[in-house]
Image (cartoon, helix red, strand yellow):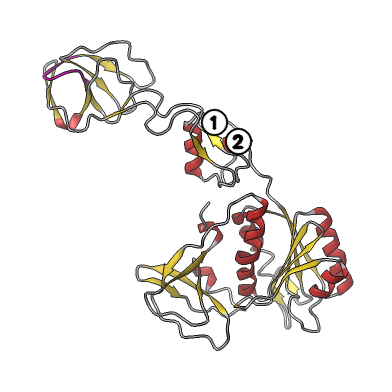
Amino acid sequence: MPLGDASGRTLAADVSALVDLPGFATAAMDGWVVAGEGPWSIVGTIDTGTPADTRLVPGQAMRIATGGLIPDGASAVIPWEVSDVVGDTVVGEIPGKVHIRPPGEECVRGDQLAQRGDTLAPALVGLLAAAGVDDVEVFVPPSVCVLVLGDEVVTSGVPGPGQVRDALGIQLPGWIQALGGDVATVRNVADDQRALVTALRDGVSSHDLVIATGGTARGHRDFLRTALDECGCEFLVDGVAARPGHPMMLARCGNTPVVGLPGNPLSALVAVVTLVAPVVDAWLGRADRELPQVHMAQAIAPARKELTRLMVGRRELGGFREVSHVSSAMLRGIAHADGWAVVPASGVEAGEVVPWIPLPWARRG
């Protein structure tokens, strides 16, 4: 696709420079390009975008702007601020740094500038453009179907007694897009196994990834597990030793992954960053990566059970601090956080370093 349309997409092939950068010797500062020792007689001006068709001889100078082509015979660029002009003569000293960028200083033609799996962040798009690239090969984002389960879920207005607003179906498209996927369908499904089996089969047959919210526990109205069994799916993950998010699930229906998110919204988002994210990464050919690290600004006591805790918080000058309102059923805390600290069951002391799961829009590309 055209490079200008590819920001945020994931490269499907390595990309190399088509030209040297810079392609010619250029001025690194506004000032005077000079030859030999001074003082220097002013013999003209070099405008950017035009060739320098004059060769300088010792004792000559020309006005030049940053990025201007250095003429033959030149030895340095003297910035405006360290020079004086007397009549038609430049007076000054050649600085210790000559302020000339040699050809190929940044890269030479054929240098690999990006590799398969890299996200085309704006700065990378700019680099590739500077290196002469017009088109790039990118992965097609996985098409995602989101199934929002629950008779109690309503999609608009103030919920009545026994009802809750759909706080996941409305936000998951943004999360999935930030991870590199494309939510094509958000569908509400009643708490009925036949309806869920039909929705799963439809989703698996027409999408690359299916995400179901709710129904992952073992209550009398949790049908996801039995519906996946009926569809002949293979369970890969059926619960994790973590809080929040322990009833998350990952199954494979043929070649299509199905991720089960817990119904509690914060638990669901933990499953997004720990199960959905790696699935999308694999689809897009991204390499495995180590989690970043964060210093803890506060001590965390040992857990009562052998569970890894994903603590919602913010990185501040003193390190990570947990935010308030962070139960598995709440969104208020994560709405003002920037990620999760991964705290072992043994707890941590203030100042210790632990892995950090950033929000998708803060991940490394």
Is residue 349 positioned above or below 188 on the image?
A: below
365 relative to 218, above or below: above
Magenta stretch encompasses residue 35 = yes
Q: Is label 1 in contact with label 2 (beta carbons under 8 Å)?
A: yes
Q: Which quadrant holds residue 14?
A: top right
Residue positioned 58% across, 52% down in the render: 287
Q: Please state which of residues 221 and 286 is positioned toward the viewer in this rendering.
A: 286
Q: Which residues are magenta?
A: 34-42
Side of 191 relative to 154 (left or right):
right
The residue that appears at 50% across and 30% down in the rendered structure is 110
Distance CA(mark 1)–CA(mark 2): 8 Å
Residue 214 placed where, x, y %? 73, 74
Give residue 191's position: percent from left, percent from top.
82, 75
Percent across and percent down for residue 41 are 15, 14
What amino acid type should be assigned to the residue bearing mark 2?
A: Val
Q: For numbered disc 2, what is the local secondary structure? A: loop
Residue 35 falls in image quadrant: top left
On the image, numbered disc 1 is attached to which residue? 133
- Residue type of the residue flagged with mark 1: Val
Q: Which mark is residue 92?
A: none
Count of numbered labels shown in the rendering? 2
Residue, disc 2:
136
